[in-house]
Amino acid sequence: MGFGFLAPSAWGYWQGAPRTGSALVSRRPADMLAPMIEAFRLSKAFRDPKRGEVRALDGVSFRCQAGQVFGLLGVNGAGKTTCLRILGTILRPSSGSAAVVGFDVLSQPQLVRANIGFLSTATALYGRLTAQETVQYFGRLHGLPEDVLHERLDRIFSTFGMNEFRHRRCDQLSTGMKQKVSIARTLVHDPPVVIFDEPTHGLDVLTARTVVDFIRDCRARGKTVLFSTHVMREAEKLCDAIAIIHNGKILAEGTLTALRERTGVQDLDDVFVKLVEAI
């Protein structure tokens, strides 16, 4: 089910693809030196009829560098999805600030959206569109000229082994095929930043492997990946740096080696538990 790895030369299309028609051209060269994702004291409060004010995020700060897979690790309800939705301009923070590729998520949301791909198993596909129509639709939303879009469609469907179901409706696809369509629409505009919100949750082993391979390939091509999960083994396999979030707060941040040294334990499950129990 996985799409495997390609030699670096095979990725030349993605690395050198023209970005005409996309807001990606608005990125300044100087921005390359800054963090690709930066969150500063992000907070988000919701009002619940029974519980009153609920703080889903409480002063969250972290940075992601170019070419890095950064893991946001926490149990369900820790605040991971809220944080990623703020960075993806889906939610507005109650306080704090954030920037993606140098663009402010509050004052420059369109430029942020042009520079990210957002992937989640919770993101549905429109069943009456074919796989190609779906990816094509998202390419046009990003303003890609038709000649560029046509070339990208051909290459991405070939890269991910999707030609066999290219013209099948999404409601006729298997779970693994649907996930490949979601990956393709996430990547069609060649974003420098990809955000994954629990992308393997509820997937079978083979389909989950497809997602894991994709994340590795993104890193190999210099893309920045922000990856949320509660699956410790995935974080150990994929992440260059990890932030552990619990009850809306960051408990620790750093490489896996640094977190092991800090806690004195090796297994990431034990690292996580020790940090949470220390609160």
Image (cartoon, rainbow, N blue to C red):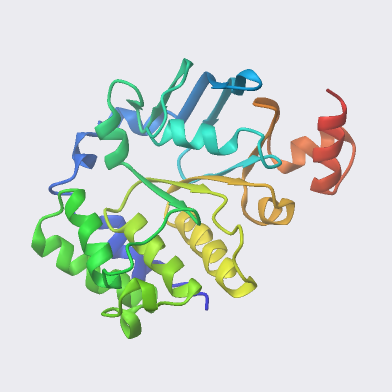
Q: Which percent across, then down, holds residue 120? A: 48, 52
Examine the rendered structure and indicate whether residue 139 appears above or below residue 206.
above
Q: Residue at x 59, y 37 (%)?
A: 80
> Which one is in front, 201 or 128?
128
84 is higher (above) or lower (below) than 238: above
**Location of residue 125 in the rendering, given as x and y in whole percent from the top left corner:** 36, 61
Q: Is residue 167 above or below residue 262?
A: below
Residue 55, quarter of the rendered image: top right
The spot of residue 14 in percent (x, y) is: 30, 60
The part of the image, by quadrant, that contains residue 253 is top right
- Viewport quadrant of the C terminus: top right
Q: Is residue 206 left or right of residue 114?
A: right
- Horizontal side of residue 102 vs 224, given as left or right: left
Q: Residue at x 46, y 21 (%)?
A: 93
Q: Nearer the viewer, residue 11 or 76?
A: 76
- The residue sitting at the right extreme is 264
From this viewpoint, is residue 36 visible?
no
